[in-house]
Image: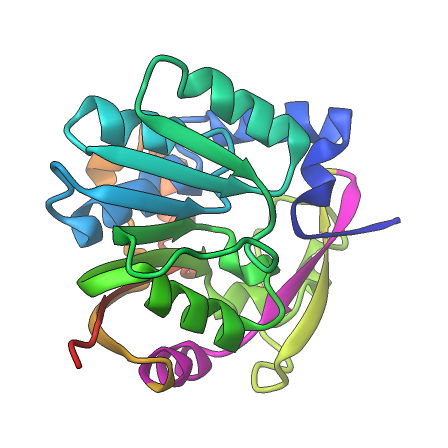
Amino acid sequence: MEFKGASVYDQADFFSNYMIRRGRQDSPNNAIEGPIMYELIGDYKNKHILDLGCGDAVFGKELLETGADYYAGVEGSEQMAAAANMNLSNLTGYVYLNTMESFHFPLNEFDIITSRFAIHYVEDICKLFNNVQHALKQGGKFVFSVQHPLTTSSFASKQSGDRRENWIVDDYFLDGERKEPWIDQVVVKYHRTIEQYFTTLRKEGFSILDLREGTPKREHFSNEEEFKRRQRIPVVLAFACVKEIK
């Protein structure tokens, strides 16, 4: 069976196994992507933040506890949304049980819109980026990360298991649907090149401030072997953009 979008996180075994992996200190989320996102977001004190594909909203909890004024998460999985609501209890945060594709984006509402490792589940990024642009205040920031296109071009090297020691890069310029074997399930993601992300952002009214490919830093890893492994191929692509003032 194949799962699209957030639906796979409503499978009980997948959800529990994912949360264990996600919580590892040396997971790409914690050791690579997390520090980059905080750096690219910059000052978020007293800001209104929207987080697309917010997962369990631990990120939102951290933002609110360190100075953000308001946080809203959009999450398509019922199990993840329930976990997010628990993490945001007694804080000025709210979780919408909705997908990024069907969420009704308010106009000129947010100072910062983020998304962490979620937009590669979205088929139509033109529509999504347009919605984000309209939901941001003038001069607002859009900061997001996706799985690096070098790793989404082909999942042939995962046939022997989730932990890859070699990475096949194939069909790189053929964008579209990919089916990834992941935690004993098959998950649908959408591959696109770095150039496609860049040109679509520009087309939808964003100026690109920064781009990162997730260069690993030793201080973020507890394990030397895992640090060296992560130096072999990029697993993160992150953009920081600003809504162009018209």
From which residue to which does the magenta span run? 184-202
The residue lying at 27 percent from left, 52 percent from top is 110
Measured as percent of width and height from the top left, residue 51 is found at 39, 45
Residue 48: quadrant of the picture: top left
The residue lying at 17 percent from left, 81 percent from top is 246
Extreme front residue here? 107
Inspect this view and state whether residue 217 appears.
Answer: no
Residue 143: quadrant of the picture: bottom left
Measured as percent of width and height from the top left, residue 85 is found at 49, 22
Measured as percent of width and height from the top left, residue 138 is found at 18, 66
User: Is 23 situated above or below 3?
Assistant: above
The reply to whether the magenta stretch includes residue 204 is no
In the image, taking residue 3 as reference, residue 84 lies left or right, namely: left
User: Is 231 situated above or below 133?
Assistant: above
The residue lying at 55 percent from left, 53 percent from top is 103
In the image, taking residue 32 as reference, residue 79 lies left or right, namely: right
Measured as percent of width and height from the top left, residue 201 is found at 36, 77
In the image, taking residue 132 as reference, residue 83 lies left or right, namely: right
The reply to whether the magenta stretch includes residue 199 is yes
In the image, taking residue 101 as reference, residue 73 lies left or right, namely: left
